Image (tube, rainbow, N blue to C red):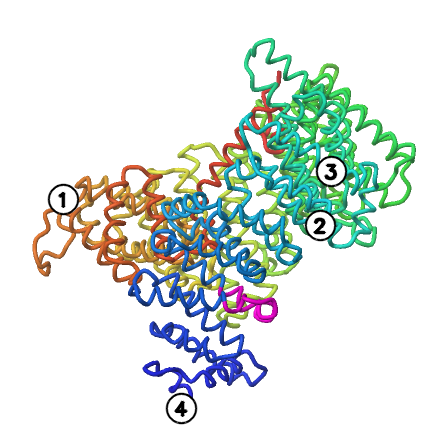
Amino acid sequence: MAAEKLRDLSQPMDVALLDATVDAFYGTGSKEERTAADHILRDLKNNSDMWLQVVHILSHTQNLKTKYFALQVLEDVIKYRWNALPVEQRDGMKNYTSEVIIKLSSDDISLRRERLYVNKLNIILVQILKHEWPARWRSFIPNLVAAARTSEAICENCMAILKLLSEEIFDFSRGEMTQVKVKELKQSLNSEFQLIHELCLYVLSASQRAELIRATLATLHAFLSWIPLGYMLESQLVQTLLNFFSMPAYRNLTLQCLTKVAARSFRDFYKMQYIKIYTIFMVQLQTILAPTSNFLEFYSNGNTEEQAFIQNLALFFTSFYKSHIRVLESYQENINALFMGLEYLINISYVNDTEVFKVCLDYWNFLVSELVMAKVTLYNPPATVRRMALQRCQLYAGPMSKLRLLMICRMAKPEEVLIVEDENGNIVRETMKDNDMLVQYKIMRETLIYLARLDYQDTENEMLKKLSKQLNGEDWTWNNLNTVCWAIGSISESMVDKQEKRFFVMVIRYLFKLSKIAKGRDEKAVIACNIMYVVGQYTSILRAHSRLLKTIVKRLFEFMQVTHPGVKDMACNTFLKIVQKCKHKFVIVKVRKNEPFVSQLLTTLRTTIKDLEPHQIHSFYESVGNMIQVESDPHKRDEYLQILMELPNQKWAEIIGQARQSVDYLKDPDVIRAVLNILQANTSAATSLGTYFLPQITLIFLDMLNVYSMYSELISTSIAQGGPYASRTSHVKLLRSVKRVTLKLIETFLDKAEDQPHIGERFVRPMMDPVLGDYARNVPEARESEVLSLFATIINKYKKSMIKDVPRIFEAVFACTLEMIRKNFEDYPEHRLKFLSLLQAMATHCFHALINLSSKQIMDFVIWAFRHTERDIAEAGLNLLLEMLKKFRDSMFCNQFYKTYFLTIEQEIFAVLTDTFHKSGFKLHVLVLQHLFCLVESSGVTVPLWDITTAAYPYPSNSMFVREYTINLLSTSFPNMTAAEVTQFVAGLFESRADYFSFKNHIRDFLVQSKEFSAHDNKDLYAEEADAQREREQQHMLSIPGLIAPNETEDEMVES
């Protein structure tokens, strides 16, 4: 009864009853009470007339939670329906909100008591302003400033409103407002800033009230990033801020404001003002914190305010230098103050705080890259320009030397290092990658390479000095050795060959000496780890010096016998990396040598791998496969392959021989594991050998398919007898692993082999029944998704030659897979993606075979796929749709296809486009819509897209019909938008269709205007711009030798 009374909005609401319902929802009552209250509140919130009760509720309740509920209702109306409300209702709510705010903030006691409520009202007011100001509320800023001068309490809250307004327009506007609206608000705030500026100066000069001063400084902080420079530098504002900097109570807020001032860029007009700001600041800073202070102790022992001061100081220096360091260095009298500031920043960089270090590192990277790029980007520069660039580098030689030591001491751990020190000080194998640390490593590596380019000799000296201290025990700790070795490894390939070889040999000698005198298992493991990391980075040196290469490889073989967890893994990984970069060196017969290194290695293969784990042996096989792959003599290559595979082949022959006598032998778990291990070793070898793996796979192929079929029958029998649970037993999992690795081996070989049709003919036909037929016959739980990816690879590899096989493949997999995955969005996730990959391959290379199959089923599946909530599946569905749209456009079935599916596709794409669950597919949604609108506008479809039997009148063209259809579709979907707004949007789609970027921006503005996306979830709308920025950064890195890590370059560069 109470619920029905609350839901009846035809009369003023019973506020006491609403208070009780809200209390029940937030209270500690029974679950049933909270659920019932939740249903009532949801119903009220969803009722379009509920907002009319807001004023009544706020006027009669004292319950803060109820007030919040009412304001949430009001906020939704303002965001989504404000422009659709009558003018008198908008004005009434605007005036009511303003009056309540002024009333509650009129005195200090009321403001403190109702602070949370007032803050929420401030947010509501700013949301209203985003619609009303400036066009329908021109007097807002003058009225606010006038009210602020009436009392200090009101002034404090007015500052909070101004801060919110600035943040909404300049910080959070992307994705919340259209680009035109943001521009309008920015211009209005700029034009009226003089009143705000005068108010702030008045408060800072006249008020003694601490809360008001802090509020004013916080407001200034929000404004200083965009206000005209004249307001800062041609008034008393900056001088006032510098005065407040000396006061401990306001120091951090003031420093944040000065940082915003420092970050502003300008032309030469204001350079003397910035020099004056820096000079005064440095004088004041020395009285607060001397440059000779122990920053590590100051930070670690400091309170929250003192630690925040160090953080803010780092931000100030980095911001100032990014914008104005060239001004400071232009005048000799400023050099000492500049160097003192850099000394502060270097000291701050040693502080043990990750966020502080990230701020400093970002600037150091910026500075050294600027110094280096000034030298390398100028092609044949004039002598004066070259001299100025060199003078600038020489000017910073002292600070850069200190920076090198900092980078060496704080070097982050690279990805290749698998051994870490745990919280108890023990050396253990790493179990999880620290992604933040890897990002930091990449930036530090880039910075060190720049520093090496500026002065290689000083970089080498600092590193060798640090390394020698490890050898003589002066500075020995595991961490110190690690950081210096990580730093040494990070600058590989950044210097000329002779320098690099000399440096590398010295480093390796130091590390080998350390290895000899090391005490204890952990200490030896740390040194071994560092040796492996360094040699893995200097593969170009090893490639040029065969004796050194052989010495290093033998040392790696020794590390493969070490029992410490992680050392073996790292030895195998490093061996693989070296082989990939130096593979030719292993097959060349050297002078005074009878055989190449690969031959010697294969002779001692059993001994080398005897202590390795199975996964390490597989890595070793891939490494040796890389060597064999570059042997030019076919007879030697086949001989090497035979020797490499001798051990697994002997075991395979033994297992198959026993199986021929009794098939039950294959059911033994140990035998199954042995089969799995053999197939994994073959897969590793196939990965590196490619086409040259043909003799080996031919040897085992038919027996492998027989084992596959037998294990498949065992799996099916187990599941049939034990039900779905049987698929999760260890025995069935082991059997399925064999099936998966079998498929993976075949896929790897066919993918890596050269595009020779006879290879496809030789292996694809025999697989049809054992693999495809087995997939179709099996129970869903026993179907391997790898079958789908295998045939996707085959079609991508052999393209049109597979057309005649597509119907058979389609018949075997389509219906049964569809039945598995269409029941929900969760089951069989791997099948979903791989099925889409198979259809994509068919659509791309065998389209004419595909369209003769069930196009309705395929299109239904494609629509289901791009509506999927899993990002990868939805994007795969959209890519498949785009491919099919393009293929049908150019086919004889164009009219038939688009007549059937055009409107359905448009409707479904708009549905996912405006659904925040699918925002990651924004770029692909735009491409699909652009394709559709270009198609109808260019008369690509020559039959009517409308139903001529039911249409009220004949349309002059498909273009006109689609315009009207789209307007009706969007008007129905977005009742909060006016007919004029929707019509304007649709017209814009047709006008901008030819230019992708204009079309995309137009749709992005629509999503903002329709309020489907909000600021917190709109980053995917700008993903393409972020990708473009990353591409530009990659191109920049290519211009500096060494910036691209050795493991990110081609496997083996051409040898000189």
In the picture, the quarter occupied by the C terminus is: top right
Q: Earlier in the sequence, mark 3 or mark 2?
A: 2
476 relative position to 1026: left or right:
right
Q: Earlier in the sequence, mark 2 or mark 4?
A: 4
Residue position marked by numbered label 1 in the rendering = 942
Q: CA distance from mark 1 to mark 3?
A: 65 Å
Which three-letter amino acid code belongs to the residue tagged 2? Ala
Q: CA distance from mark 4 to mark 3?
A: 69 Å
Residue at the image point whose x is 16% and y is 48% from the top: 960
How many other residues sit within 10 Å of disc 1, few (<14), some (14-19) or many (≥20)?
some
Helix, strand or loop for the magenta stretch, by majority? helix
Residue position marked by numbered label 2 in the rendering = 308
In this rendering, the label closer to the viewer, 4 or 3: 4
Q: Earlier in the sequence, mark 4 or mark 3?
A: 4
Q: CA distance from mark 1 to mark 4?
A: 61 Å
The range drawn in magenta is: 103-121
| Mark 4: secondary structure | loop
Tell me, yes or no, if residue 281 can be seen here. yes
Q: CA distance from mark 2 to mark 4?
A: 56 Å
In the picture, the quarter occupied by the N terminus is: bottom left
In this rendering, the label closer to the viewer, 1 or 3: 3
Residue 367 in picture, x, y percent from top left: 65, 29
Q: CA distance from mark 3 to mark 2?
A: 24 Å
